[in-house]
Amino acid sequence: MDRIDDYINRLREALGQSARRSVLEEVEHHLRDTARDLEERGASSAEAERLAIVAFGAVELIATEFAEVFESQECNVIELSRREAVLAETIEVEVMNIRFGPLTEDEIARWSGKDPDYAEQAKSNVALHGVVLKERNGDRELCIFMGQFEAAAIAVGKEGKTFARPMTHDLIGDFMRSLDDFAVDRVTITRLEDKTFYAEISATHHGDAMLVDCRPSDGIAVSLRLDVPIFVSRDVPPFSKAA
Amino acid sequence: MNRELVKGHLDVMLLAAVQGAPTHGYAIIQTIKDSTAGELELAEGTIYPALHRLEQSRLIIGRWSTVSGRRRRVYRLTKRGEVTLSKRAAEWRGFSRAMDALLKGA
């Protein structure tokens, strides 16, 4: 492990639950660019890394400034939304893993919690694949069931893989990024109804908030490509108060 | 250059640095360093939280792109960012003129 790897690990640790893969990647690129330039000017590899880190700033300073940005992010997004009351009652989650293949009874029991609606839909989807979402500031998990292609699209997005030609969700992401003054704020899993999870994409276009209905699998796949946060409503088991 | 003075004007410096072609963080720092003739006292890493804050305010948009064969997050101004930069630049010029007049001979 070199000095830059060590710096990134310490920054990840200092950011805690706020650590985002894209932020750490961006910081690492900056440090390696700086070190490369210094090496080209004659510094040894170790010295170049040390100087790059000194110029970048102490881990604690950078982590504190990022934490302030991320803490205020949720407030801004909620202000922009037309459905403040609903969106305020959400919990941020991240994609933990993709579970390919039929689920076991133990897994269903684990994700069902105490909620009968969730258990019922889990049992009816036992042959499907699952994407496990974990609470960012806690240990609760939610498994959303979906088909193989949908799960594969999420796995590809999580790994950051790209193909020679854009796949469907890459195309959607490219479209969204290419629009002027348009930005996706977040994806929210909003409810579980009749054994089906519902989701919506929140975006801002020329300063106006908009919501787009979507399947959770599509919303998650798009969020990974645009690097926007995923939230789950407190109405959704097992995050609901009853569970 | 005074650190607090730089910090207080970092947002407008960043908006000015990303106007024109989409630019990544490392290039933004080089632009700011060149413009300030190396007098800048700023921890380079502090521009990244600031860039994310500007993106959150919809003044810039960041996206991953491949630049010279390397994956980079590049930023560009939004329309709202252009308006804000133009307004802040006019305010700064007015303030600068007033200070120059006041400090004449100091």
Image: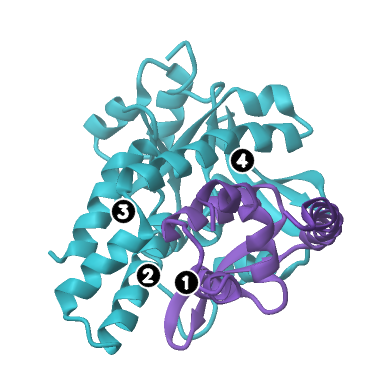
* Residue denoted by label 4: A199
Colour in which chain B is drawn: purple
Tell me the distance, in whole angstroms, between the alpha carbons under discs 1 and 2: 8 Å
Are dots 2 and 4 on a single chain? Answer: yes
| Residue B15 place in picture, x, y as percent | 69, 62
Residue hosting label 3: A100
Q: Amino acid at mark 1?
A: Tyr
Q: Amino acid at mark 4?
A: Ala
Q: Are marks 1 and 4 on the same chain?
A: no
Looking at the picture, which amino acid does disc 2 mark? Answer: His
Amino acid type of disc 3? Phe
Residue indicated by mark 2: A29
| Sequence-earlier tag: 2 or 3 | 2
Q: Visible in this render: residue B95?
A: yes
What residue do we see at 83% from left, 60% from top? Answer: B93
Chain corresponding to cyan in the figure: A
A230 and A145: which is toward the camera: A230
Quadrant of the image occupied by residue A157: bottom left
Q: CA distance from mark 4 to mark 3?
A: 22 Å
Q: Secondary structure at mark 3?
A: loop
The spot of residue A169 in percent (x, y) is: 56, 65
CA separation in Å, label 2 and label 3: 33 Å
